[in-house]
Amino acid sequence: MDSTVWSFYARELFRYEVDAPSVLMLDNFDAHVCEEGINVVAETTSAIVCQLPANSTAVFQPLDVGVMDPLKENITAKWLADISVPEEDSQPTAVEDESACRKCGLVELCVCWEECVCWDECVCYGDACLCYEEFICLKSCEIDMDMDARSDPRSNVAADEQQSVRNRQTTNQAAEKRLAAIIRTIEAWEELSEDVIVKSFQKAIPMYPTVDV
């Protein structure tokens, strides 16, 4: 979660859960306790942010440690299994893409950056970030048009069609990656044992000492 997602959550979801002056207790995540994050809560709700003490997550948020940590580990493992891990200091190689080019809309080799959907933060190995896969063309896909061609109405129509192709490709790609992330999350959750969930809830439920009378 970054500041954009936190702002969206506060404005579109959390604001409807607060109907009276309240105190919102948050951990030390930057998006939560930065000036921007605190202000968006104050502006959209009647709550004020109270920052939890450092290194107190295990005490104040036992479910976050006991349930979310193993869940995130499982999701990360499944994500890494679905992609190839780049070697450090490796150079991008030329890859032939038979689909329509993201720049010019033509079926040829293309240059593009393909961004994946991260569930939390980038998982990186050295300087090689797994959040981006780089594809480099064997030849440029930029169309070199002279001034006469640019003034040709037919070229404008072609450009509009190419832009439409690019928009459809971007939308489809994002939808596929969101679906893959959802499926991985469901699979990771189903792999958590009942003992993990039960023990986490037992730790989260306040236990008061009993006194024999």
Image: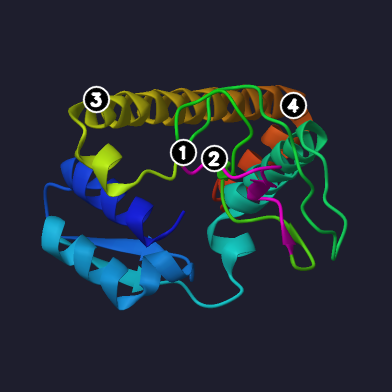
Query: Disc 4 or disc 3, which is closer to the eye?
Result: 3
Q: How far apart are marks 2 and 3 (CA)?
A: 19 Å
Query: Disc 3 or disc 1, which is closer to the eye?
Result: 3
Q: Of marks 3 and 1, which one's residue comes earlier in the chain? A: 1
Element marked by disc 3:
helix
- Report the span colored magenta: 128-142
Q: How far apart are marks 3 and 1 (CA)?
A: 18 Å
The part of the image, by quadrant, that contains residue 183 is: top right
Q: Are marks 1 and 2 in contact (CB under 8 Å)?
A: yes
Q: Of marks 1 and 2, which one's residue comes earlier in the chain? A: 1
Viewer can see residue 100: yes
Q: Do the residues labelled 2 and 3 touch (CB within 8 Å)?
A: no
Query: Disc 2 or disc 4, which is closer to the eye?
Result: 2
Q: Residues within 10 Å of mark 4 (few under 14, many from 20)?
A: few
Q: How far apart are marks 1 and 4 (CA)?
A: 49 Å
Viewer can see residue 17: no
Q: Of marks 2 and 4, which one's residue comes earlier in the chain? A: 2
Q: How far apart are marks 2 and 4 (CA)?
A: 53 Å
Q: What residue type is labelled 2?
A: Cys
Q: Of marks 4 and 3, which one's residue comes earlier in the chain? A: 3
